[in-house]
Amino acid sequence: MGDDRITLVSGNWKMHENHFEALKLVQELAALLRASGVPEGREVSIHPTFTSLRTVQTAVETDHVPVALGAQTCHYEVRGAFTGEVSAEMLAKLNVAYVLAGHSERRLYCGETDEIVRRKVDAILANGMRAIVCVGESAEQRSSGEAMSVVTAQVASAVGGRDAEVAGAMVIAYEPLWAIGSGQSATVADAQEMCAAIREEVGRLAGAGAAATVRVQYGGSVTPDTAGALLEAPDVDGVLVGGASLDAERFMGIVRAGQ
Ligand code: PGA
């Protein structure tokens, strides 16, 4: 991680934990954080399902748990006849701070295109929240040598045309599809290479200032054992954690990794 950038460790709970279970998980996390706190220079976000957001928000705010509330997606429209959807404004009213946009599972199963992801980012930013834009290549794209071009095109679509300050406040999560939930993390060298390329692309799109402050996470089978080395890499400013974020002890192992 870079010297001035706050490392962001995010827990993506995906479609796990009903609101009773979510409350238990956040309470377990709160107890561990009470004991040891969040290490200096680090920040934690947790991303429960929509049905658990209000419960987790109340627990976090009542007990002053030092985590930021996150969501997993939102709709790009302000309001309207979009059955089943949740707007960015609705999330902002729950004091959500970070919203994932374009997670590969949503790109794959819900047909989210780069165009839709960009509109979601617009909605997130318009409501005063921070976007965590997820990008990443498939195994086939990596083996055919397209990884870099696929990822930089996704970055360009989400970041291009934004003010330097706005671009520099964004978070981009590099999550190669083959590493998600597979137990096969990218190597530190591969994660570093792509995170550096993403930073360079942000620099090309929005200038050196934005490149210096944009935070780039790595995600895909991160565990307490692998997180320390990943977070040491100069261009890896955090991790986006799925499976290992569902266990408070393991997640805390990642929050504290390398400290
Ligand atoms: P994983 O998921 O840690 O279970 O691989 C990461 C993610 O999809 O955000």
Image (spheres, rainbow, N blue to C red):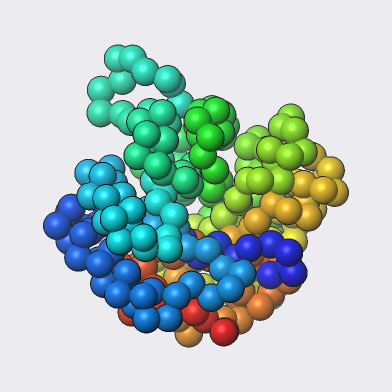
- Inspect this view and state whether residue 199 appears: yes
- Inspect this view and state whether residue 140 appears: no
Q: Residue at x 84, y 43 (%)?
A: 207
Q: Which is nearer the eye, 146 or 98? A: 98
Which quadrant of the figure has residue 115?
Answer: top right
Which quadrant of the figure has residue 16?
Answer: bottom left
- Direction from residue 164 to residue 229 in the image, left or right: left
Q: Quadrant of the C terminus?
A: bottom right
x and y, in percent, of residue 38 in the image: 48, 72
Q: Looking at the picture, does residue 138 appear above or below residue 187?
A: above
x and y, in percent, of residue 247 in the image: 30, 73
Q: Residue at x 32, y 57 (%)?
A: 60
Residue closest to the far top: 81
Q: Quadrant of the N terminus?
A: bottom right
- Direction from residue 223 to residue 81 in the image, left or right: left
- Direction from residue 129 to residue 171 in the image, left or right: right
x and y, in percent, of residue 33 in the image: 38, 74
Q: Which is nearer the eye, 9 or 112? A: 9
Q: Residue at x 73, y 64 (%)?
A: 4
Q: Which is nearer the eye, 244 or 69? A: 69
x and y, in percent, of residue 191 in the image: 64, 68
Q: Which is nearer the eye, 256 or 35? A: 35
